[in-house]
Amino acid sequence: MSTGLDKQISDAVKAAMRAHDSTRLGTLRLLQAAIKQKIVDERIEPDDAMIVAIIEKQAKQRRESIAAFESAGRSESAAQEQAELDILKEFLPQGASAAEIDAAVAAAIADVRAKGLQGGPAMGAVMGQLKKALAGRADMAAVSAQVKAQLAQA
């Protein structure tokens, strides 16, 4: 584990230990454990793209937990998950602006329509392109809803 992002995470763990920041330390240790699990499971050395994918997965889990806790009226638990999500966001690439997302969606849909795809295959092709273009920079669930809406207009 010697990628740039992995080194940033390790340095952040050390800083959290020195600062006695238990929330940050726990979140970062869970992230390191997920990265190490991926290494063990797949017997590969992760690159930054793979680490970003792991962080995205962790962030998605936190967003889902926040929604569940808020709907159950457990605001303290939701606040804890939000704090963890904020820590994870520090290691994701800069988020794409709404204009960038709209432009990427429009370009991907135009490309897929030029190939003559419609319905489910069109959705899959568009999302495949967008996942590569917006990896770690956008909430793919929101992008998916936007793509569905635009494909339904045709």
Image (cartoon, rainbow, N blue to C red):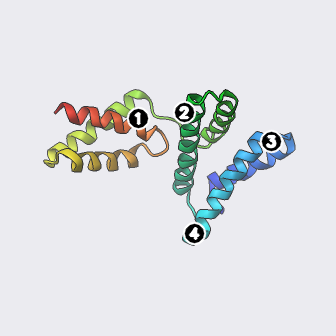
Residue that numbered label 1 is attached to: 142
Q: CA distance from mark 2 to mark 3?
A: 23 Å
On screen, residue 133 versus residue 74, left or right, reads: left
Q: Residues within 10 Å of mark 4 (few under 14, many from 20)?
A: few
Residue lying furthest left in this view? 116
Q: Which mark is residue 22?
A: 3
Residue lying furthest bottom in this view? 43
Q: As displayed, is residue 151 above or below residue 44?
A: above
Quadrant location of the N terminus in the rendered image: bottom right
Residue that numbered label 4 is attached to: 41
Residue 103 at x, y percent in the picture: 32, 33
Which residue is nearer to you in this view: 153 or 97? 153
- Identify the element where label 1 is drawn: helix
Residue under the point 67% across and 30% down:
79
Q: CA distance from mark 2 to mark 1?
A: 15 Å
Q: As displayed, is residue 102 above or below residue 41?
A: above
Q: CA distance from mark 4 to mark 3?
A: 28 Å
Residue that numbered label 2 is attached to: 67
Whichever of callouts 2 and 4 sits on the residue coming sooner in the sequence is 4
On screen, residue 150 versus residue 46, left or right, reads: left
- Identify the element where label 2 is drawn: helix
